[in-house]
């Protein structure tokens, strides 16, 4: 080996060592920064809360900000101190925070800590860790109301908490945390389609964007998957494999609203995949019917979850977030009312 090649190889190895060290140092610095902000927040919070006066709290934060800026320079604005107090308020238990700063940056934590509902906050924490989202992706998922659109939101809070705990403690991912409803196809540039093949073409052409909307663990396997049953040919629109669910995911695209007959078609596809395509050690295939509209009562009566089938509505363009949020909150309330009614009915039967 000549000197030039030897030097180039040495430079490459040393550069790698330096880059890895810089990443570790940056991570350590970020973690220490989070701990610092929490400790400051705890101290300020205890002082302010002792007085129980809003005006006193405002004055003490402004005066502290002024003194810290004189001593240490910019970075200690009243707003930053309020971030510190909020951090210590939301994560009052330091042990909970200590598990976060090992995996999430201060920017992640600052975004998450302003989510009011604890169950919603836990959802974004676990999904960020699972998918390794950067801060921009996390903020985008929040803006698109991922929590509200996830299938689990239609379940009682106890079950959602159980699924999140399974993910956090045992790294077991529930299908309900994977499939979202509705799915926005605006990322594909779709504004109108007249044939299912056009929808399929658009999804395949912009597969990366579609998978990002669906979730990062989807691997594309086939398009128009051919199945022969009793000498009759059937074709499944799209076939994926989900890495963490460890199962095949069959996707059937429909232009119109959901129809009860679609359940039978999807069940046939899933049984065929289970018999001929499922590898040893894999979980049972899951079906996703993607349509332009759906009836909650149809889905409830057909007991689709028991058949390992999900239905998601697709939207050609991103709607006004306020309208979507209102619609989703109404759906949540309806679901919770049904749960309450069922519980009351069960109690009456016992009595």
Image: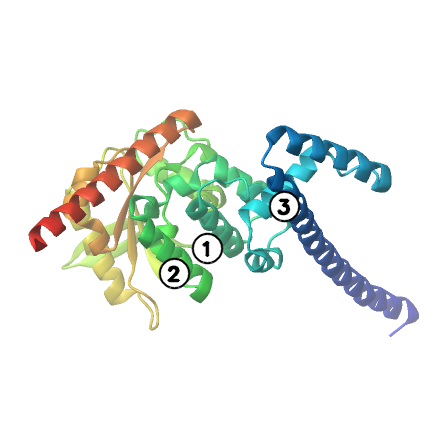
How far apart marks 1 and 3 lie (CA) works out to 44 Å
Relative image position of residue 48 (x, y in whole percent): 64, 39
Q: Which mark is residue 179?
A: none
How far apart marks 3 and 2 lie (CA) works out to 45 Å
Q: Residues within 10 Å of mark 1 (few under 14, many from 20)?
A: some
Dot placed on the residue nearer the N-terminal end, 3 or 2: 3
Helix, strand or loop at label 2? It is loop
Residue 2, above or below 25: below
Q: Are marks 1 and 3 in contact (CB under 8 Å)?
A: no
Relative image position of residue 177 (x, y in whole percent): 38, 51
Q: Which residue is mark 1?
A: 217
Is any part of residue 223 visible from this angle?
Answer: no
Residue 133, above or below 259: below
The front one of 228 and 107 is 107
Residue displayed at 42% across by 30% down: 190
Residue displayed at 42% across by 48% down: 119
Relative image position of residue 135 (x, y in whole percent): 59, 44
Looking at the image, residue 34 sits to the left or right of residue 144; the answer is right
Relative image position of residue 247 (x, y in whole percent): 35, 61
Q: Which mark is residue 46?
A: 3
Helix, strand or loop at label 1? It is loop
Q: Residues within 10 Å of mark 3 (few under 14, many from 20)?
A: few
Is any part of residue 303 visible from this angle?
Answer: yes
Q: Nearer the viewer, mark 3 or mark 2?
A: 3
Q: Residues within 10 Å of mark 2 (few under 14, many from 20)?
A: many
Q: Which residue is mark 2?
A: 245
Residue displayed at 72% across by 61% down: 24
Dot placed on the residue nearer the N-terminal end, 1 or 3: 3
The N terminus lies in which quarter of the figure?
bottom right
């Amino acid at each position: 080996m000549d000197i030039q090649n030897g030097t180039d190889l040495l430079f490459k190895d040393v550069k790698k060592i330096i880059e890895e060290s810089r990443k570790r140092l940056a991570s350590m610095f970020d973690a220490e920064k989070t701990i610092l902000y929490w400790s400051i927040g705890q101290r300020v919070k205890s002082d302010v809360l002792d007085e129980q006066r809003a005006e006193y709290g405002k004055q003490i934060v402004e005066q502290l900000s002024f003194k810290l800026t004189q001593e240490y320079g910019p970075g200690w604005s009243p707003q930053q101190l309020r971030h510190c107090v909020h951090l210590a308020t939301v994560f009052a238990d330091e042990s909970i925070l200590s598990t976060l700063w090992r995996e999430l940056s201060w920017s992640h934590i600052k975004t998450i800590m302003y989510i009011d509902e604890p169950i919603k906050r836990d959802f974004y924490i676990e999904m960020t860790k699972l998918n390794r989202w950067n801060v921009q992706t996390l903020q985008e998922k929040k803006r698109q109301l991922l929590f509200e659109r996830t299938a689990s939101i239609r379940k009682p809070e106890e079950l959602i908490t159980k699924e999140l705990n399974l993910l956090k403690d045992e790294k077991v991912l529930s299908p309900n945390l994977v499939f979202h409803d509705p799915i926005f196809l605006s990322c594909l540039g779709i504004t109108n389609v007249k044939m299912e093949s056009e929808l399929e073409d658009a999804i395949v052409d912009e597969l990366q964007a579609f998978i990002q909307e669906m979730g990062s663990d989807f691997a594309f396997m086939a398009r128009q998957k051919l199945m022969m049953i009793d000498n009759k040919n059937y074709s499944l629109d799209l076939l994926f494999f989900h890495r963490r669910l460890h199962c095949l995911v069959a996707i059937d695209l429909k232009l119109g609203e959901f129809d009860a007959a679609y359940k039978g078609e999807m069940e046939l596809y899933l049984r065929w995949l289970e018999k001929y395509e499922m590898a040893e050690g894999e979980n049972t295939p899951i079906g996703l019917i993607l349509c332009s509209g759906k009836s909650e009562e149809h889905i409830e009566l057909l007991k689709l979850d028991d058949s390992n089938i999900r239905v998601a509505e697709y939207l050609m363009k991103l709607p006004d977030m306020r309208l979507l949020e209102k619609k989703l909150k109404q759906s949540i309330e309806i679901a919770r009312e049904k749960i309450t009614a069922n519980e009351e009915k069960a109690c009456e039967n016992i009595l």
